[in-house]
Image (spheres, rainbow, N blue to C red):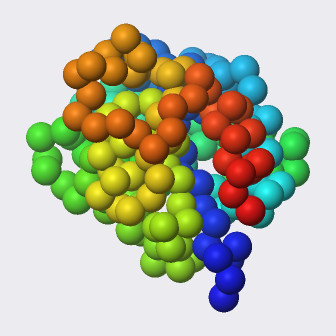
């Protein structure tokens, strides 16, 4: 297999694909889900360059009783349906619905969800990018061995840079900007 067979993008959801509801808040149903301008175009750009694309997201609102797994599946359906309009299909959507105190292996910054993707399609971390809007995402990327790509369209802000534990591999304003750079510089 060539390295092109392993090209993979992992995307956090809230703050990367859709507008973040804010700290300690959740997108509770599909009516509250709003795509960030350019995010679909960014996903399409990566997809057309041959990347496998996964959504990897913590969704503890389920275990907290704020919304149901059915609500989460409706949001997934909305994402899939919207991407199909652009002839884009995802390789997988993985969520951790556990409470943050459950200490599960799948809650970011742990890498359980990323490892599921590895077993499904034989992903190679060194050819992978994890695009997220928090340092939980960046820590998961580093632990997994993927390139850590921080976007500033969600929770993390550049003003916090002095307090970051480490510098991500890349920092971009949003998913579209990240996708344009990755697709132009990594064949």
Relative to residue 120, is residue 164 depicted above or below?
A: above
Taking the spot 37% from the left edge, 11% from the top edge, the residue there is: 159
Relative to residue 53, is residue 14 depicted above or below?
A: above
**Location of residue 58 in the rendering, given as x and y in whole percent from the top left corner:** 36, 41
Relative to residue 90, is residue 17 depicted above or below?
A: above
Q: Is residue 56 left or right of residue 98?
A: right
Towards the viewer: 124 or 68: 124
Count of labels in the image: 0
**Location of residue 32 in the rendering, given as x and y in whole percent from the top left corner:** 57, 18
**Location of residue 158 in the rendering, given as x and y in whole percent from the top left corner:** 42, 17
Q: Is residue 33 left or right of residue 177?
A: left
Q: Residue furthest bottom?
A: 1
Residue 30 visible somewhere in the drawing: no
Taking the spot 69% from the left edge, 31% from the top edge, the residue there is: 177
Taking the spot 46% from the left edge, 67% from the top edge, the residue there is: 125
Towards the viewer: 18 or 180: 180
Residue 102 visible somewhere in the drawing: yes
Taking the spot 42% from the left edge, 68% from the top edge, the residue there is: 116
Which quarter of the image is occupied by the C terminus? bottom right
**Location of residue 23 in the rendering, given as x and y in whole percent from the top left corner:** 33, 16
Q: Is residue 88 left or right of residue 24?
A: right
Which quarter of the image is occupied by the N terminus? bottom right
């Amino acid at each position: 297999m060539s390295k092109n067979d392993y090209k993979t993008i992992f995307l956090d959801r809230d703050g990367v694909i859709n507008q973040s509801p804010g700290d300690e808040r959740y997108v509770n149903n599909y009516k509250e889900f709003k795509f960030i301008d350019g995010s679909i175009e960014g996903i399409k750009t990566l997809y057309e360059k041959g990347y496998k694309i996964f959504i990897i997201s913590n969704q503890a609102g389920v275990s907290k009783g704020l919304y149901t797994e059915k609500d989460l599946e409706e949001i997934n359906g909305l994402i899939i349906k919207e991407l199909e309009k652009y002839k884009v299909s995802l390789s997988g959507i993985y969520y951790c619905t556990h409470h943050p105190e459950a200490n599960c292996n799948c809650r970011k910054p742990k890498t359980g969800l990323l490892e599921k993707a590895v077993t499904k399609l034989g992903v190679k971390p060194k050819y992978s990018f994890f695009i997220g809007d928090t340092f939980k995402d960046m820590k998961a990327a580093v632990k997994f061995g993927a390139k850590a790509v921080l976007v500033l369209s969600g929770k993390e802000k550049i003003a916090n840079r002095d307090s970051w534990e480490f510098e991500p591999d890349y920092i971009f304003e949003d998913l579209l900007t990240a996708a344009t750079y990755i697709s132009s510089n990594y064949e």
